[in-house]
Image (tube, rainbow, N blue to C red):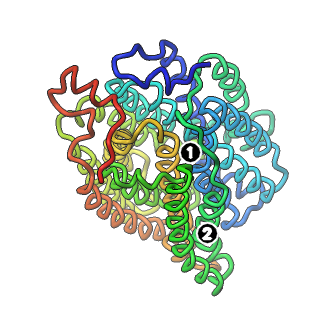
Amino acid sequence: MTSTETLMSKPGEVPDRRRWFALAIVMTAAFMDLVDVTIVNIAVPSIQRDEGASFSQIQWITAGYALAFAAGLVTGGRLGDIHGRKRVFLVGMGGFTLASALCGLAVNPEMLVASRILQGAMAALMVPQVLSIVHATFPAHERGKVFGLFGAIVGLGAVSGPLLGALLTEGDLFGLAWRPIFLINLPVGVAGLVLGSRFITESKAPRALKLDLVGVLLVTLGLLMLLYPLTRGRELGWPLWGYLSMAGAPAVFAALVAYERRKGARDGSPLIELSLFRVKSFAAGIAVQTVFGLALGVFFLVWTLYMQVGLGWGPLKAGLTGVPFSVAVSAAAGMSVQKLVPRFGRKVLQTGALLLAAGVLLYIWESERYGAAVTPWQMALPLVVMGTGMGLIVAPLTDAILSGVPRAHAGSASGLINTVQQMGHALGLGLVSVVFFGVIGDHLRPAEVGPAFVDAFQHALGWVAAVLGVIFLLMFALPKRPAQHLEGAGRDDVRAADREPELVP
């Protein structure tokens, strides 16, 4: 089959007519991945109670997925460039579906953690192809609309995951308790495999590339050295080897950069295309994405524990409480790319960061004022403010990062975007040991558990608000407007944006 790279290589040519069918399929895969993350968050307390899992195992159910996802994303993106994005997407979706079945059949916490790690590794093959297929299939002037849809899907996944998880967990279908939250992926995955094989057009890098195995090893080693001791540190009493491992991780990443530079000069097939970092929008956006992922990693886990353990709410009540947040994310994400960014550019993302921080501070104030008597209705206002802020960031940020990326490196770029987001997310989950569990006593009487979790939630949200302030400052390094959203762009501008962008020296 003719690659999309060939179909779309010349400006003015007719785009692939099946691109909207392909978009629906890859967006379904992205939706499945997003739902899987949020659906697990809402079910964490039930899994802990039913399986007798420790708090460290609960962290690993979420962090193990994020760690495997982060470690494999760059490799997954590059494999799509080399072997074909459609092919690698379908392999990842098949593996993700199988891993979901293993999660649903897990007989103990250890098997569940292992299955989640496998699920994250398969998602690392599947997810990078979503953005790279979009980037390779759609002309530049259509990508704003596509990324607006992507933002709406993010919001829909955010609202569907907690509600679906709550309904499936409390419904106890066939006496399976929390297990249907994973088994529901099976019919979706099978349908995606069948339809994807028919409607997605194959695409790959226009010249032959090789997989950089040394680069794969260094990326994986560096991430493991950083994230494993951070996640398990509190459980093990913060041993010396953990500090040494985290301190050594930057040296591994420095070695990776040096090796990738030599690899690129030697045969032009590095795992990480370092030239991408000379694209200002890409380099700045990667920094923002990393810190943004860290803030979200902390917030969502401690929020779930706060509602279900600290306040004693059931999964359904907790899931319904999140509806205002998710609806606000979806509405703001869909509007931001189409309406706001073309007019206001970077200021939209900065406004989103300020709104997120304001919502977090408002949430802290309400939690302190109402204590354990707080109601879902009282939480609605801070959650709407936070959701609006997140929606203003999530879709435009992806668009801004990819706006100057050459199409030949779409897979590598999208892999890096997802890697740093998941690395930040995993770092946030690891920091939960410090900013949340670190302020909870080890031996609490039953009457002390609720107040301790409420206090820890407020402490953790203070850190989240500080991180959002850092994000606001980092956003000044983003371009004022993504390339394809320049006001007054005529036909010639659109065609110019569809050519391979030049790298900033």
Q: Residue at x 51, y 55 (%)?
A: 264
The residue tagged 1 is 38
**Nearer-the-camera pick, 80 or 287:** 80
Q: Quadrant of residue 310?
A: bottom right
The amino acid type found where label 2 is placed reads Thr
Q: Residue at x 45, y 38 (%)?
A: 323
Closest to the observer, 167 or 399:
399
Nearest to N terminus: mark 2 or mark 1: 1
Q: Secondary structure at mark 2?
A: helix
Q: Position of residue 304 (x, y in %)?
A: 54, 54
Residue identified by numbered label 2: 231
Is residue 305 visible in this depiction of the protein?
yes
User: What residue lies at 62% left-to-right and 33% top-to-bottom?
Assistant: 84
- Residue farthest to the right? 107
Q: Residues within 10 Å of mark 2 (few under 14, many from 20)?
A: many
Residue 65 lies, with reference to residue 337, above or below; the image says: below
Residue 113's place in the image compared with 438, above or below, is above
Percent across and percent down for residue 75 are 61, 49
Kind of residue sitting beneath label 1: Thr
Residue situated furthest front in the rendering: 266
Q: Is residue 365 left or right of residue 319?
A: left
Q: Give percent across and percent down for residue 194.
A: 70, 20
In the image, farthest residue toward the left? 488
